[in-house]
Image: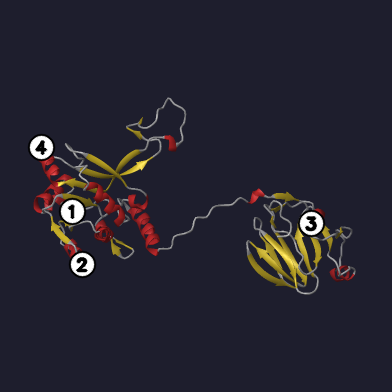
């Protein structure tokens, strides 16, 4: 590698048809071509870096970014000109041993990938090195299977041989082999008569901008990468791993409320104050006041430090009215303190529990429905 003069060429013509002037299009405030130039410079493996274009505006960008500019003939920027044409023109006019072509339309290529690619290209094993993407899934060409058989059982994708496609973001050619192929065959892009190697590109680096949707994807990906805020891996945890309880009296007793009274249900008028005054305030108690096919209302009093067990309701919303005292309300790990006069709403699917605080009994009116499923974590009592 030390004995080779390695040249980076970034082609950038103005005449793009699908996205006009795409190499000048701003992404996060910088022209698209900026990202390829910066990655090439950061790779630290090139003797010279050139922008190759027919347009003088790219000379201005090259000078601003501290690299060189090669002005190709106008004819080599037409729609009919192919990669072989402008590459051989460049090779004939810029001396070197190894030409590495870096496309500006893949702005998320990293300096490390460029460096590793160049190391492989300069290893002496290849005359041409081509960047590729692997696709390990069932693939078809010309309506025929490539890596699977129509007359075979289904196989999972990880068992299939990967199929590669050109990434094109990075191509490398030895000067002499390229010139020889062009002289003998009139083409050299795919390697022609030479040793051809393939270098896999993966992840964000494989994003290639050809249309407006690609620009949107690249802009989001670049903003995410440059923010340096990488989200930690999180996974959905099933709430269905616990056990279900529905009997209200059993649930209350497991919560420490042993004195449960259901004799006041559905009276036309019930005075809460009279019910409370009739109770022994030295222990926990409950009194179910309403129980119909539509809803239920249970008055519950617990001593400081007592409460219910952590649970959630998969298909029912409930609410509580705080009649007296102070409670700590825990919902999805977030703690709130509620007191007399507060109304507490518990959305279905949310883990919650409530614990009496202070130095006197706390009383709440729990409004729900009979036989509503309470899901508890396995072997959990008072969390």
Vertical placement of residue 158 versus 25, above or below: above
Query: Is there any visible trace of residue 228 in the rendered image?
Result: yes
Between residues 210 and 247, which one lies in front from this camera angle? 247
Q: In the figure, residue 65 lies in which quadrant?
A: bottom left
Residue 200 pos. (x, y %): 32, 45
Q: Earlier in the sequence, mark 1 or mark 3?
A: 1
Q: Give SS at disc 4.
A: helix
Q: Kindly report which numbered mark, 2 or 1, lies closer to the viewer in this rendering.
A: 1
Which sits earlier in the primary sequence, circle 3 or circle 2?
2
Residue at the limit of the structure toward the top, as seen here: 151
Reading the image, the residue beneath label 3 is 254
Q: Earlier in the sequence, mark 4 or mark 1?
A: 1
Residue 41: x, y in percent? 24, 60
Question: Is tag 3's residue or tag 4's residue first in the polypeptide sequence?
Answer: 4
Q: Earlier in the sequence, mark 4 or mark 2?
A: 2
Identify the residue under disc 4. Answer: 184
The Cα atoms of the two marked residues, 4 and 2, are separated by 40 Å
The CA span between labels 4 and 1 is 30 Å
Looking at the picture, does residue 177 appear above or below residue 353? above
How many angstroms separate mark 3 from mark 2 (CA)? 74 Å
Q: Residue at x 47, y 59 (%)?
A: 231
CA gap, disc 3 and disc 4: 89 Å
Q: Is residue 105 visible?
A: no
Residue denoted by label 1: 2
């Amino acid at each position: 590698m030390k004995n080779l003069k390695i040249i980076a060429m970034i082609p950038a013509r103005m005449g793009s048809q699908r996205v006009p002037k795409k190499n000048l299009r701003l992404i996060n405030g910088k022209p698209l071509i900026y990202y390829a130039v910066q990655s090439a410079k950061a790779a630290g493996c090139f003797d010279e870096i050139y922008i190759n274009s027919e347009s003088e505006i790219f000379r201005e960008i090259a000078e601003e970014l501290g690299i060189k500019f090669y002005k190709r003939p106008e004819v080599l920027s037409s729609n009919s000109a192919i990669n072989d044409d402008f590459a051989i023109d460049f090779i004939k006019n810029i001396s070197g041993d190894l030409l590495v072509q870096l496309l500006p339309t893949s702005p998320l290529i990293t300096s490390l990938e460029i460096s590793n690619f160049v190391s492989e290209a300069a290893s002496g094993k290849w005359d041409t090195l081509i960047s590729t993407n692997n696709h390990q899934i069932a693939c078809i060409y010309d309506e025929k299977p490539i890596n699977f058989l129509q007359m075979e059982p289904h196989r999972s994708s990880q068992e299939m041989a990967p199929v590669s496609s050109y990434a094109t973001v990075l191509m490398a050619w030895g000067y002499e082999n390229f010139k020889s192929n062009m002289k003998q065959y009139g083409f050299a892009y795919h390697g022609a008569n030479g040793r051809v190697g393939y270098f896999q590109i993966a992840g964000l680096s494989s994003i290639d901008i050809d249309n407006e949707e690609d620009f949107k994807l690249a802009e989001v990906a670049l903003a995410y990468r440059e923010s340096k805020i990488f989200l930690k891996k999180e996974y959905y945890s099933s709430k269905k791993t616990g056990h279900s309880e529905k009997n209200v009296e059993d649930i209350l007793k497991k919560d420490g409320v042993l004195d449960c009274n259901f004799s006041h249900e559905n009276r036309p008028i019930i005075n809460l104050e009279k019910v409370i005054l009739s109770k022994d305030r030295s222990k926990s108690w409950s009194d179910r006041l309403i129980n119909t096919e539509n809803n239920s209302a249970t008055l519950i009093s617990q001593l400081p430090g007592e409460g219910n067990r952590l649970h959630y309701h998969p298909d029912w919303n409930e609410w509580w009215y705080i009649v007296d005292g102070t409670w700590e309300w825990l919902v999805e790990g977030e703690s709130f303190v509620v007191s007399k006069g507060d109304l507490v709403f518990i959305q279905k699917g949310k883990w919650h529990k409530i614990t009496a605080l202070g130095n006197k009994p706390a009383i709440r009116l729990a409004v729900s429905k009979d036989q509503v499923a309470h899901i508890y974590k396995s072997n959990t009592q008072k969390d």
